[in-house]
Amino acid sequence: MKKLISLSILLMSIVFARAQDKIIDTIPKIDGVYGYQEVVQLDSSYKKDFLYKNAKIYFVNNFKSANDVIQYDSKEDGKVIGKGNLTVYDSNLTGTFDWRVNFTTEITCKDGKYRYRIYDVSIVETRHGGYNQVYLTNLSVDQAIAQTQKGVVKKVSVRLFNKAVKEFQADIASIKIDMAKKDALSKNDF
């Protein structure tokens, strides 16, 4: 019985270890470009101006300095565009790696709905090796995916890619939460 349990645990750990060597989820391609996009329908009580204010609140809540991030802001168009980045870290025997993932977020509002887009995704990879060596590499999403397929940095690249995708998914969830708030601006606690 002990051998059967030990064998089961060993097999499960092998399966789990192999799952970590693969990209769990990826960044979708829209019209040949990597990014995320969705039109989210809300009820008709959400007016364009109110959704626009929620979009501004999203940028304030999710970026260190919304004023530095926002590149385009038009109440008339109901559109806010910002450039941001996120950083993910990992390491292997050859050193420590971090990816600064740069991206653009656009939220466009209309009565009863909004569209978010996350696009212009690029990566700056920093490798810290022995003897205080630092290597910087600019990567496209295709190059980052290629790194997950072969080479010395395959496993660490897979982990970094999976972490970046999870960060994007969390960001999308945050957009949806902030945009769906009904009382974000009407609440007065004073």
Image (tube, rainbow, N blue to C red):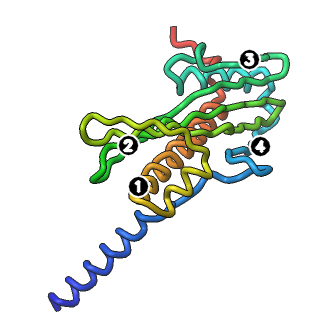
Q: Which mark is residue 153?
A: 1
- Find numbered disc 3 in the image and state the secondary structure of the residue it sits on: strand
Residue name at image x 33 percent, y 75 percent = 14
Among the two numbered marks 4 and 3 on one chain, the one whose residue lies closer to the N terminus = 4
Callout 2, which amino acid?
Answer: Phe
* Residue 97 numbered tag: 2
Which residue, given by chain and number where applicable, does mark 3 sit on?
73
Q: Secondary structure at mark 1?
A: loop
Q: Residues within 10 Å of mark 2 (few under 14, many from 20)?
A: many
Q: Are marks 2 and 1 in contact (CB under 8 Å)?
A: yes
Q: Mark 2 to mark 1: distance in Å?
A: 9 Å
Identified by mark 1, the residue type is Val
| Nearer-the-camera pick, 84 or 74 | 84
**Earlier residue among tags 4 and 2:** 4
Does residue 27 lie above or below 96 as drawn? below
**Residue furthest top in the image:** 190
The mark nearer the N terminus, 3 or 2, is 3
List x then y, in percent, for residue 134. Answer: 36, 35
* Cα gap from disc 1 to disc 3, whole angstroms: 40 Å
Q: Residue at x 30, y 42 (%)?
A: 129
Please tell me whether residue 107 is drawn above or below residue 139 in the rendered image: above
Q: Amino acid at mark 4?
A: Val
Mark 3 or 2: in front is 2
Mark 4 or 3, closer to the camera: 3
- Nearer the camera: disc 4 or disc 1: 1
Check contact, mark 1 vs mark 3: CB within 8 A: no
Kindly indicate whether the residue at mark 2 contacts the one at mark 4 (C-beta within 8 angstroms). Answer: no
**Percent coordinates x, y for residue 53 in the rendering:** 69, 20
Residue that carries the numbered disc 4 in the rendered image: 39
Please state the horizontal and vertical placement of residue 183, each as a whole percent of the image. 63, 24
